[in-house]
Amino acid sequence: MAEKTTKMSTTAKAKTTGVKTKKAPPKRKPTAKKAPAKKASAKSSNAKRPEAKRNLRAAAVETGRNALRAGLGVYGKAYDQLQDQFEILQKQVDDAQTHLDGRRKQAEDLYDALVKRGEIVEKEALKAFGELELDSLTDRSKLEEQMNKAKSRFEALRSRLKKAA
């Protein structure tokens, strides 16, 4: 029975127990304040609403597209700047390569000239060495005579080298 009493309403309890309770006043519906001027404008704005929504939606879509286009413009501008920098760097590399090729050609020409000059000096040195008498190296006077002769030839070679350089 305890379960039944908890489920019963207060009026039902009052009837079974015989206690009188006050009835709650009936609930009133809230009344809306009427503003005739606003309702008229509300009706006119309601009539324009679908068109206003379309204009607002079109404006929002266009704004979104413009934001996307601006982002794409940033990427495009960055790409163009990188492309320009790449072209400048490529030109610098090409110029450096041309300069390097020129220097390499100069070095090769100088090397060839030094080799030719070395061949000439080698021939003259072998000729001077061939004229030395190695048998007479044991005799001191002959050795000094040969040394003086070789010194004079080397001095002549040295003066020729100085004149050629």
Image: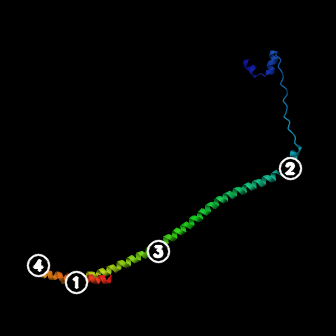
Residue 59 is left or right of residue 149, and the answer is right
Q: Position of residue 15 (x, y in %)?
A: 82, 18
Q: Amino acid at mark 3?
A: Thr
List the single residue furthest toward the top: 18
Q: Nearer the viewer, residue 70 or 143?
A: 143
Q: Residue at x 59, y 63 (%)?
A: 79
Q: Residue at x 18, y 82 (%)?
A: 148
How packed is label 3: few (under 14 Cα within 10 Å), some, or many (20 or more)? Answer: few
The quarter of the picture where the C terminus appears is: bottom left
Disc nearer the start of the sequence (1/4): 4
Q: Would you identify the image quadrant in which residue 103 lies? A: bottom left
User: What residue does disc 4 label?
Assistant: 138
Q: Residue at x 51, y 69 (%)?
A: 90
How packed is label 2: few (under 14 Cα within 10 Å), some, or many (20 or more)? Answer: few
Between disc 1 and disc 2, the foreground one is: 1
- Give me the C-alpha separation between circle 3 and circle 2: 79 Å
User: What residue does disc 3 label?
Assistant: 98
Q: Residue at x 81, y 21 (%)?
A: 11
Q: Amino acid at mark 1?
A: Arg
The circle drawn on residue 153 is 1
